Image: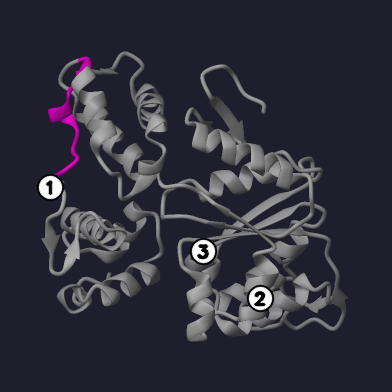
Amino acid sequence: MGGNNNGTQRFLGMPAIICSERMRELMRMVERVAMTNATVLITGDTGSGKELVARALHHYSLRSSKPWVDVNCAALPEHLIESELFGYEKGAFSGADSTKQGLFELAHGGTLFLDEIGELDRKMQVKLLRVLDGTPYYRLGGVRKTSVDVRILTATNQDLEEATRSGAFRRDLYHRLSHIQIRVPALRERVEDIVPLAEFFLHEHNPSLVFTREGKEALRAYSWPGNVRELRNVVSKAAVLAEREEIRASDLPLGSQAPGTAENGFPTGTLDGMERQMILRVLEQTGGHQQRAAELLGISRRTLSRKLKLYGMDEAYQNCMA
């Protein structure tokens, strides 16, 4: 596996700090899968590193010299997803002043990564399934069919198998996308990576700063419900507010984390409880502003709204939709 001795690698410009045996084993599997053309569904908690795994799959593949195109399905408004993926002809709709290639065409010969695939509506699920089966498609407003050679990688933090049972996600598409499944372990499942990641992020901000022994112990002891993304944010805040060259445990904005306590029926030790706790904390930081909170959490506002409804918090923040 490429990289230097301290476990640092880069995949399409994205740094990867891989020190734990859990992640080393995962990357060995990534290298093997990368050499095939199999579609891959990458699963894992929000912020755990699913995009990094997708980039590594392209990096190690025979398509590595070809285009890499990525899109977050939840970040695109529903009425734009089709035109973005499949392109359109001039005059196809109001504002279509010129022909535009879709992301499938731009990725021809290479890899197309569809993040948050669970957010795709059923109409687009049907069209995606047809393209995966090799069926040529029309651009919006087009009269000529387009054929592409693209490897598809997808990622989700949702339980797509459960979504197929509820009818929210097509079962045939799920089976087509999950030819190979790769689960990215949460940061709390690979404790050996926490301090090296934190030190890397700290060095990015200020190479002269270091963590004290107690600071490192606090980092290891925290459960990181927001995973690597939360770790980066915590380190960034500590670096910006640092008044000395050593970052102590008290300098880390980790919040209270009493094990076994429960809040509104969600134990903090469960995934639901930790996710809910993180969402509440970020909403408090943004004054209830959902768009800014979603950006900090690394999810779409639509996903955040769904989470708030799931946890019965939608009414409390219904006036903070901007």
Residue type at the position of mark 3? Glu
> Eyeballing the image, is 15 above or below 291?
above
The residue labelled by disc 3 is 116
List x then y, in percent, for residue 241.
Answer: 19, 29
- Residue 48, percent across and down? 44, 47
The label number, if any, that marks residue 258 in the structure image: 1
> Could you tell whether 219 is left or right of 170 in the image?
left
Name the quarter where the N terminus is drawn.
top right
Q: Secondary structure at mark 1?
A: loop
Q: Position of residue 8 (x, y in %)?
A: 53, 25
Query: Upstream in the sequence, badge 2 or badge 3?
Result: 3
246 drawn magenta: yes
Tell me the quarter of the picture where residue 126 sits.
Answer: bottom right
The image shows residue 102 at horizontal and vertical percentages of 71, 66
Question: What residue sits right under mark 2 in the picture?
Answer: 173
* Residue span colored magenta: 245-255
Tell me whether circle 2 and circle 3 mark residues in contact (CB < 8 Å).
Answer: no
Relative depth, front residue between 208 and 183: 183
Picture quadrant where residue 250 is located: top left
Q: Along the line of sight, which residue is nearer the eye, 131 or 40?
A: 40
